[in-house]
């Protein structure tokens, strides 16, 4: 199940694990990314918590957790090559994975059609 937030994060649920990234639209809006701050593995978060930061030549942008849970993995490969974060690769470049407490947290997120309408 793939869902999107109004803050341009995407969340892909697989059982009780959720991969989180930012949408191609968000990457486009940010421009060239110059710094990423990833969360610590084992951090417990609530839905809506800012857990990561992307800084670009234009602005800094918080990345929010779509659900309450615990950070189980971070994509540290992003730190090695910031130029790999492009609109074309945004859907493959997850930022962190989260073991969620309750899948109903994701019910307020949009499906792809609703998200496309939001940014269109």
Image (cartoon, grey):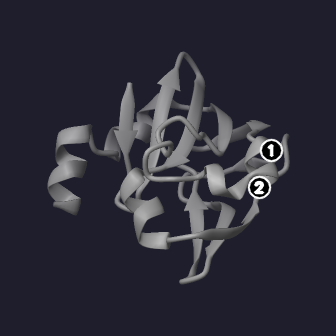
Residue ranking furthest to the top: 15
Q: Which residue is mark 1?
A: 76
Against 67, residue 119 (above or below) is below
Residue shown at 60% from the left, 81% from the top: 57
Given residues 80 and 98, the one toward you in this image is 80
**Badges 1 and 2: C-beta atoms under 8 Å apart?**
yes
Q: Quadrant of residue 20?
A: top right
Residue ranking furthest to the bottom: 58
Q: Quadrant of residue 98?
A: top right
Q: Secondary structure at mark 2?
A: loop
Q: Position of residue 5 (x, y in %)?
A: 38, 53
Against 16, residue 57 (above or below) is below
Against 11, residue 103 (above or below) is above
Q: Which residue is mark 2?
A: 38
Q: Position of residue 71 (x, y in %)?
A: 74, 40
Given residues 102 and 88, the one toward you in this image is 88
């Amino acid at each position: 199940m793939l869902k999107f937030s109004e803050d341009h994060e995407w969340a892909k649920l697989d059982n009780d694990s959720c991969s989180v990234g930012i949408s191609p639209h968000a990457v486009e809006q940010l421009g060239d990314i110059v710094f990423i701050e990833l969360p610590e593995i084992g951090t417990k978060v609530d839905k809506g918590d800012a857990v990561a930061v992307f800084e670009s030549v234009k602005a800094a942008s918080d990345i929010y957790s779509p659900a309450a849970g615990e950070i189980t993995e971070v994509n540290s490969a992003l730190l090695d090559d910031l130029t790999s974060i492009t609109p074309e690769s945004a859907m493959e470049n997850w930022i962190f994975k989260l073991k969620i407490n309750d899948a109903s947290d994701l019910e307020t997120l949009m499906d792809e059609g609703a998200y496309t309408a939001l940014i269109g």
